Image (tube, rainbow, N blue to C red):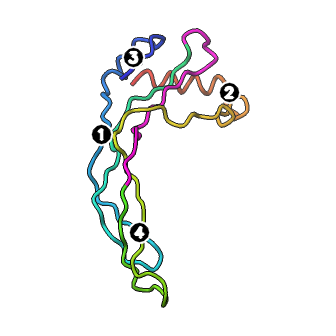
């Protein structure tokens, strides 16, 4: 897990307490193709969790700092599998070969970034400073 030196101690301690758990896990994947019999095959998936945070910037208190990490593949493997297609028309093949992919390894990597245009400032969203400060005061009293 990588730690940002700009994090305040509370966020840093919380992020450190949630260990990254991202690993290749065996699964059964059902291959499907129109007109063919679905075929379950052994495969792999990336399953786990990764540390993420959002906090007020230490140097620019009007901005937010985000770190979103997701359990994703790093490298992939490929396999060719034959499917039986009983509904094939005369002259068409009864077996087709399909190619499927699976993760080779998994790791915590940055998630798709949040577009700044998707974050609505409080002035536009219709919240006043008073309403928000009341909310924050209540959450600190927990």
Q: Earlier in the sequence, mark 3 or mark 2?
A: 3
Q: Does residue 70 appear left or right of residue 114 in this picture?
A: left
Q: Which mark is residue 133?
A: none
Q: CA distance from mark 3 to mark 2?
A: 30 Å
Frontmost of labels 3 and 1 is: 1
- Dividing the picture into quarters, in which one does residue 86 lie? bottom left
Q: CA distance from mark 1 to mark 4?
A: 29 Å
Q: CA distance from mark 2 to mark 4?
A: 61 Å
Using the image as rendered, state which of residue 15 and residue 126 is in the foreground: 15
Q: CA distance from mark 2 to mark 1?
A: 44 Å
Where is residue 33 drawn, in percent x and y?
Answer: 45, 72
Q: Secondary structure at mark 3?
A: helix
- Dividing the picture into quarters, in which one does residue 28 lie? bottom left
Frontmost of labels 4 and 3 is: 4
Where is residue 106 drawn, in percent x and y?
Answer: 35, 38
Cβ atoms under marks 2 and 4 closer than 8 Å: no
Q: Does residue 59 appear left or right of residue 42 in this picture?
A: right
Q: Which mark is residue 12?
A: 3
Where is residue 9 drawn, in percent x and y?
Answer: 40, 11
Q: Which residue is mark 1?
A: 23
Frontmost of labels 2 and 4 is: 4
């Amino acid at each position: 897990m990588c730690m940002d030196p700009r994090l305040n101690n509370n966020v840093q301690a919380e992020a450190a307490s949630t260990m990254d758990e991202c690993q290749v896990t065996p699964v059964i994947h059902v291959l499907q193709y129109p007109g063919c019999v679905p075929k379950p095959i052994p495969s792999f998936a990336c399953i786990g969790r990764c540390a993420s945070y959002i906090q007020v910037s230490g140097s620019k208190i009007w901005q937010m700092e985000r770190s979103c990490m997701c359990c994703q593949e790093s490298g992939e493997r490929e396999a060719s599998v034959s499917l039986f297609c009983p509904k094939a028309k005369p002259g068409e093949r009864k077996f087709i070969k399909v190619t499927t992919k699976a993760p080779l390894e998994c790791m915590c990597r940055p998630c798709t970034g949040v577009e700044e245009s998707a974050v609505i400032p409080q002035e536009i969203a219709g919240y006043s400073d008073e309403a928000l400060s009341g909310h924050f005061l209540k959450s600190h009293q927990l």
